[in-house]
Image (tube, helix red, strand yellow):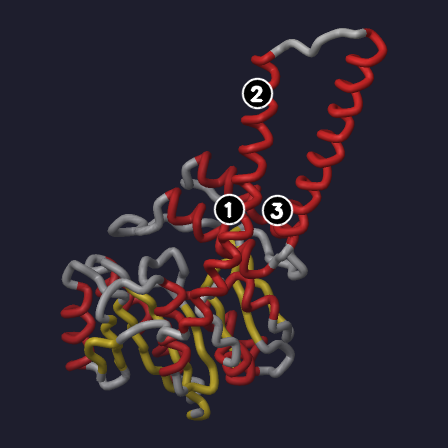
Amino acid sequence: MVKNVLSLVIPCYNEQESIPVFYRETCAVLEMLEQKNLGAEFIFVDDGSNDDTANIIINLSRNDGRIFYMIFSRNFGKEAALLAGLQKSRGQFVVTIDADLQDPPSLIPQMLDPVISGEFDCAGTRRVTRAGEPPVRSFFARRFYRIMDVVADIKIVDGARDFRLMNRAYVNAVLSLSERNRFSKGILPWIGFKTKWLEYENIQRTVGKTKWSFWDLLFYSFNGIIAFSTKPLAAASVAGILLFVLSIAFIVFIVVRRLVWNDPVTGWASTACIILFCAGIQLFTTGIVGAYLAKTYTEVKQRPHYLVREEN
């Protein structure tokens, strides 16, 4: 750890338009911090971009000794990029921030004050509005937070961003969790510590476009639920028990109807529907079990979180 140094961890994926603008705005903020005798370092993590992102970062580093970079051998995902940046960081304080300027660098001084004072271990940010976001995406995002409140043992703040400022003890706690299936929105509240929340209005991208599609976010949310809750497994078991009880009731009904009223059972269409319904439930619950088994399989293989092609 280097005291009085702020490490900025910046995961990047196809951000060639954003990085120069982000760098200029962030440098302006860091100049104010330097007046408080707080140095800084940039840690850019290129997550296998297929545009000119890596070259732009490398060129910036040639003119600014504060810039360090890691270029992944391929796209490993934002979670891997965040982990790599945290592992490389040396500062007493660490900021995780996106390069698309939806995380305003101007908030860094406000985030720094409660952490430097020692009152809080982390300063997190959350969006209080989703203005400009597609309505469908906003709807499912809010449903996700409500589902997590029900199924998870942790509290994930609605609108929480990956834009955070942490002290070294907080960073070390995050790094102590070595799981392969990482979900930062769950990991950060799971470790505890005292967090100060700062709210701000949603900010649209100034350049470029989001790299997260609706389906990417949907699967990411599934990963989060599986990573921090076993209640879906319990729900699958409950569904199996209910269907078993229901089938016993149907069997008793059919036997009684045949013996008492001598009424042969008809209705092949309804029978087929019931069979298909039960088969669907079975496949669904098997899929839930398979998802947990797949995550366990990934952990057992112990593959590295990422591979680095180039770094300085």
Secondary structure category for the residue under label 1: helix
Quadrant location, the C terminus? bottom left
Residue 270 lies, in percent from the top left, at 61, 15
Would residue 24 be visible to someone looking at this image? no
Asked whether the residues under the numbered discs 3 and 1 touch, taking CB atoms below 8 Å apart as contact, a structural biologist would say no
Depth-wise, is mark 2 or mark 3 nearer the camera?
2
The label number, if any, that marks residue 273 in the structure image = 2
Picture layout, residue 167 above or below residue 137: below
Q: Is residue 249 or residue 24 the one in the foreground?
A: 249
Residue 127 lies, in percent from the top left, at 51, 52
Which tag, 2 or 1, sits closer to the chain's start? 2
C-alpha separation, residue under disc 3 versus residue under disc 1:
19 Å
Residue type at mark 1 is Gly
Picture layout, residue 103 above or below residue 7: above
Q: Which residue is mark 1?
A: 287
Q: Callout 1: 10 Å neighbours few (<14), some, many (20+)?
A: few
